[in-house]
Image (cartoon, rainbow, N blue to C red):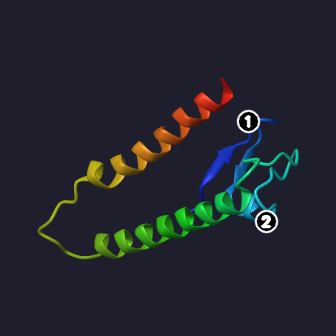
Amino acid sequence: MKIKGRCLNCGREVLVDQIVEGDGHCPWCGRAFNKDYTANLVQSLQEAQAAGTAMENALEQVSGMELWLELDEESVLEPIRHEVRAARRHKARVLR
């Protein structure tokens, strides 16, 4: 899984791998994505991307099996949506 975002300073799209390589800074404009916790941000983004890849791989294995089971898509996606929305709400508070 490749997680991507957008720099709120320059508006360009950025991948987590680019943020990691830039030690928490935008590869395009150089601005830190968090002024105080860039190391924590980098670690958390790496963990999120690795967890997403692990989940994607596990679900791919499940999808290759003949099952008498239907997975509930929302039970997988809604917790992720909730956290992404929470991050957006926090961003909105910070930008005020």
Residue at the outermost right position:
29
Name which residue lies at 19% across and 75% down. 66
**Depth check: 5 or 66 in front?**
5
In the image, taking residue 11 as reference, residue 67 lies left or right, namely left
In the image, taking residue 85 as reference, residue 64 lies left or right, namely left
Q: Tell me where residue 32 appears, x and y as whole percent.
A: 80, 48
Residue at the outermost top position:
96
Quarter of the rendering containing residue 49: bottom right
Mark 2: secondary structure = helix
- The residue singled out by tag 1 in the image is 8
- Crowd band around label 2 with a 10 angstrom C-alpha radius: few (<14), some (14–19), many (20+): few
- The residue singled out by tag 2 in the image is 21
Real-space Cα distance between discs 2 and 1? 18 Å
**Depth check: 74 or 8 in front?**
8
Mark 1: secondary structure = loop
* Quarter of the image where the C terminus is located: top right
